[in-house]
Image (cartoon, grey):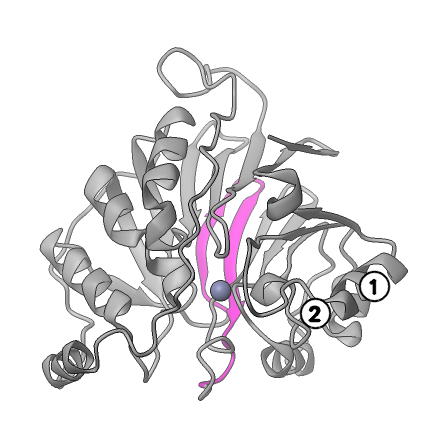
Amino acid sequence: MIPVTKRKLISIPAGTALVLLAVLLAGSLFSFSCAPAPRPPAGPGDPGDSGKPPAGKQPELRAFFINVGQGDSCLIMARTGSGEEFTLLVDAGPAGASEGVVEFLREAGVTEIDYLVFTHPHEDHIGGGKAVLDAFEVGKVYMPKTSHTTGAYEQLLLTIESKGLTVTQVRAGKVILEEKDFEVEFLGPVKSYEDLNDCSAVMSLTFGKKVLLLMGDAEAQAEKDMLEAGIVPDADVLKVGHHGASTSTSGEFLKVSRPSVAVISVGPNPYGHPSKTVLDRLERAGVKVYRTDLHGTVEVVIKGDRLDVSTR
Ligand SMILES: [Zn+2]
């Protein structure tokens, strides 16, 4: 576990106060209206008495795609070949699911979050951020640079500042963790975009020979730019972009990323997520699809060459 360090917030640019004021005046114009009550998540099981896996065990990565309704939150707990343990949280779900997310993390044995990533400022990804930051010690916070903002984003920035934490900007190509058999890298955004979804932090997590690809809400343009940059990995697990919207998960992207398992984090919504187009495309590619709305929380366990998926 890396030591938790705290620094002063330095990355809020000049003029942010005006932006924040504008946001306050604008109210929740950009906020998503969906805040479904999540099913209470169950614990991951076998966390050990102290909540930590017992020492001396084999390297293992567990990823939980938490059922937060319409939104995203993925908890990753990894024990590397050197015995180091890391906890990452990628997005915190919508505000309506925040209690469930905090409870899930506690039951999973989380006491500190080494890396907290908010993929982009939409409420269904950051709404639970305040509750998570209030409940857990956090080492580093990552977010992409965006020119837009939302009421939920403003609240999140204020919470981060109040904890004495800094925000590190996501940059494509930046490796944030490089350990024995475990590497975490940002693949996107490779450019700046008008569309907040395309600004999403896209992450690849390589554990031994297995690769998890977490897309945030990145859409086809961001996928195309990553393909052109030649940085899309051969993946085993794909956290499907933008809750399975038809504007993400292009055929070309699937052809290169070649996942065997896809997870769609989605709940009741008025947007038609996930789209039949994407579901059909995944089926044609022979990808096994798990959906949080149908299966509940999806757990992926990687141990050596084994990759197992279960749902709860
Ligand atoms: Zn979203």
Q: Pointer 1: what residue? A: 280
* Horizontal arrangement in the rendering, residue 81 relative to residue 155 (left or right): right
Residue 239 is tagged as none
Label pair 1/2, CB-CB below 8 angstroms: no
The furthest residue to the bottom: 194
Q: Is mark 2 within 8 Å of ligand 1?
A: no
Task: Name the magenta segment's main secondary structure.
Answer: strand
- The residue carrying mark 2 is 249
Camera-nearest residue between 48 and 244: 244
Callout 1 environment at 10 Å: few (<14), some (14 to 19), or many (20+)? few
Rendered residue at 21%/69% (across/down): 154
Q: Residue furthest top?
A: 49
* Magenta region, residue range: 173-192
Q: Is residue 118 at all visible to an observer of this figure?
A: no
Residue 292 in the image: above or below residue 214: above
Q: Position of residue 35 (x, y in %)?
A: 40, 55
Q: Is residue 175 magenta?
A: yes
Amino acid type, label 1:
Asp
Q: Nearer the viewer, residue 155 or 84?
A: 155
Q: Nearer the viewer, residue 247 or 58?
A: 247
Residue 37 location in percent, x, y?
42, 45
